[in-house]
Amino acid sequence: MTLLKRYVLRLFISLKYITANVVDRNNGKIVVTASTVEHALKNTLECGRSCNAKAASVVGEVLAMRLRVEGLEQGQGRGIHVDVNKEIEKKGFKNRTKIWAIVNALKSNGIKLILEDENNSGPESTTRYRGGDEFINTKD
């Protein structure tokens, strides 16, 4: 079963800033973004020299609000794809709490996320659909 990954969550984490983007892969444009660089968020957070998991969860909440405004909380029925293991590999193991804070903030605000396993290319791959409070494993 091949899934079209139209909307994908991409994270950018540095020592000072956290940015979360939802990218439309059909045209390669960023649909919604939230970041600690924005003055509205920067002034409310206490990110001095580094941002923590609390700042990451605020970024996730703001991203969820903006997705709802755009009407993409369900990702046009397909959900928003997140490969958490890939993001942890790219950002480093010490940033895993920030990554999970963003993902959990999106889940708790009702965004339909599709969490992918790291070996999602083989015939024994599983994809977990997150909608509300249930997970649906698709394993053939």
Image (cartoon, rainbow, N blue to C red):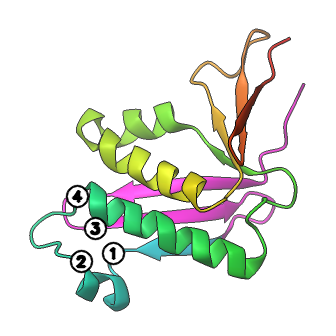
User: How far apart are labels 3 and 4 at the CA level?
Assistant: 9 Å
Checking the image for residue 36, the label placed there is 1
Instruction: State the SS at label 3.
Output: loop
Instruction: State the SS at label 2.
Output: loop
Q: Which residues are magenta?
A: 1-30
* 1 or 4: mark nearer the eye: 4
Quarter location, residue 135? top right
* 1 or 2: mark nearer the eye: 2
Q: Is residue 4 shown left or right of residue 17?
A: right
Asked if the residue at tag 2 contacts the one at tag 1, i.e. Cβ–Cβ closer than 8 Å, the answer is yes
In this figure, which residue is indicated by the disc labeled 3? 17
Residue 39 at what x, y percent from top left? 32, 90
User: How far apart are labels 2 and 3 at the CA level?
Assistant: 11 Å
9 versus 64 height, above or below: above
User: How far apart are labels 1 and 2 at the CA level?
Assistant: 8 Å
Report the quarter where the C terminus lies.
Answer: top right
Is 17 in the magenta?
Answer: yes
Checking the image for residue 120, the label placed there is none
Q: Is residue 41 shown left or right of residue 5?
A: left
User: How far apart are labels 1 and 4 at the CA level?
Assistant: 11 Å
Asked if the residue at tag 1 contacts the one at tag 3, i.e. Cβ–Cβ closer than 8 Å, the answer is yes
Residue 107 at what x, y percent from top left? 59, 52
Quarter location, residue 43? bottom left
In this figure, which residue is indicated by the disc labeled 2? 45
**Mark 3, other Cα within 10 Å: few <14 / some 14–19 / many ≥20:** some
Asked if the residue at tag 4 contacts the one at tag 3, i.e. Cβ–Cβ closer than 8 Å, the answer is no
In this figure, which residue is indicated by the disc labeled 4? 52
